[in-house]
């Protein structure tokens, strides 16, 4: 079983951890739209794509647990405050090789990763959102938007896709999208034209793992059908085969399930309990569902 995961952050890391229990070959295609924290600083100061989401995915696949733990160490004093060791290592490897994708591959070798991680693109991009009354620029600002997000797009609009990322999607038996921030993580990955086209063309089964809870500012009021609709609006109507929706609902702000609304999208709906009590996706529970698909 060849599995490709798309998205970013802690959500995609949970999917990759789940895939380790049932997949023979694991690939991750990761957003590079983050402009906050350590990642944003390294992009502005060194001119490299943001490494934070990629670091989390590498750690999720790491077999060298000691190095993985070191990669997640965050400095809390001095000039390095806020930076993680892993981000700095990826930055250093990029400077040495002159190639961000190769630096990510080398970091994977250091961590002895059970799979490969690819940036969606190695170009420097900004994420913008169209909202009522204008536009918002930057991943952090979009995530904090108090206005309904109508659409998101990249600048430049047509960055080249990483060749390894495209190959991973095309060769997969199963492509798992998310979970994670809908617009600023998942859709930001799919906005790279080559990634979007590969998702449309692949013969793999394409599965969206829907978020279990709304994200304040970004997905307030959006139910499961709206999550599916947002992906299809950006990628195309024939871009998903199934969606996994958390049942029963969790927390005070759950992503609700409207079965009638979901029928409009003609995707298979899998209702399952795949989260921890906190609402975060549980890799073990998620693996039991995804392995059956």
Image (cartoon, rainbow, N blue to C red):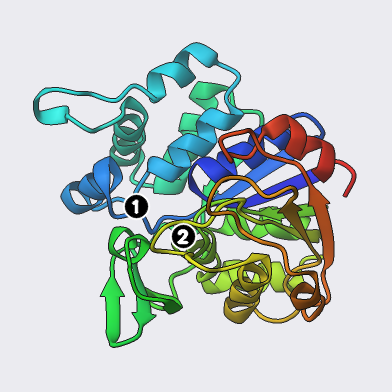
Q: Which mark is residue 121?
A: 2
Q: In the image, what residue occupies the spot 36% across and 81% down?
A: 131
The residue most toward the left is 78
Relative image position of residue 62 (x, y in whole percent): 57, 24
Viewer-side residue, 188 vs 211: 211
Residue 155 showing in the rendered view: no
Kindly state the secondary structure of the residue where label 2 is placed.
Answer: loop
Between residue 100 and residue 259, name the one nearer to us.
Answer: 259
Q: CA distance from mark 2 to mark 1?
A: 9 Å
Image position, residue 43 (x, y; %): 25, 51
Asked if disc 2 and disc 1 are in contact, CB closer than 8 Å, the reply is yes
Image coordinates of residue 205 in percent, x first then y, are: 82, 59
Residue that numbered label 1 is attached to? 49
- The part of the image, by quadrant, that contains residue 143 is bottom left
Q: Earlier in the sequence, mark 2 or mark 1?
A: 1
Secondary structure of residue under mark 1: loop
Q: Quadrant of residue 139?
A: bottom left
Q: Position of residue 289 (x, y in %)?
A: 83, 43
Residue 216 visible in this rendered orientation of the protein: yes
* Residue appearing at x 62%, y 50% in the figure: 212
Q: Quadrant of the N terminus?
A: top right
Looking at the image, the residue that sits furthest to the front is 252
Q: Residue furthest top?
A: 66
Q: Residue furthest right?
A: 292
**CA neighbours of label 1 inside 10 A, class few (<14), some (14 to 19), many (20+):** many
């Amino acid at each position: 079983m060849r599995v490709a995961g798309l998205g970013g952050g802690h959500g995609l890391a949970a999917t990759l951890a789940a895939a380790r229990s049932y997949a023979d070959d694991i690939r991750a295609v990761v957003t590079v739209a983050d402009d906050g924290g350590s990642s944003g600083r390294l992009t502005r100061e060194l001119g490299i794509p943001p490494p934070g989401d990629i670091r989390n995915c590498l750690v999720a696949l790491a077999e060298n647990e000691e190095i993985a733990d070191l990669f997640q160490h965050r400095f809390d004093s001095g000039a390095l405050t806020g930076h993680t060791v892993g981000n700095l290592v990826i930055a250093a490897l990029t400077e040495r090789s002159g190639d961000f994708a190769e630096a990510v591959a080398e970091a994977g070798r250091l961590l002895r990763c059970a799979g490969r991680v690819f940036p969606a693109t190695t170009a420097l991009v900004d994420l913008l959102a169209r909202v009522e009354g204008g536009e918002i620029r930057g991943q952090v600002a979009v995530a904090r938007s108090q206005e309904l997000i109508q659409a998101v797009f990249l600048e430049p609009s047509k960055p080249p896709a990483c060749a390894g990322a495209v190959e991973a999607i095309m060769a997969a038996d199963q492509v798992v999208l998310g979970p994670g921030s809908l617009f600023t993580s998942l859709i930001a990955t799919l906005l790279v034209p080559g990634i979007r086209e590969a998702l449309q063309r692949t013969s793999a089964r394409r599965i969206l793992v829907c978020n279990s809870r709304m994200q304040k500012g970004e997905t307030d009021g959006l139910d499961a059908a709206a999550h599916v609709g947002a992906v299809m609006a950006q990628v195309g109507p024939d871009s998903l085969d199934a969606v996994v929706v958390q049942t029963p609902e969790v927390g005070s702000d759950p992503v609700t399930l409207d079965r009638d609304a979901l029928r409009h999208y003609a995707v298979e709906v899998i209702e399952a309990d795949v989260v921890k009590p906190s609402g975060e996706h549980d890799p073990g529970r998620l693996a039991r569902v995804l392995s059956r698909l």
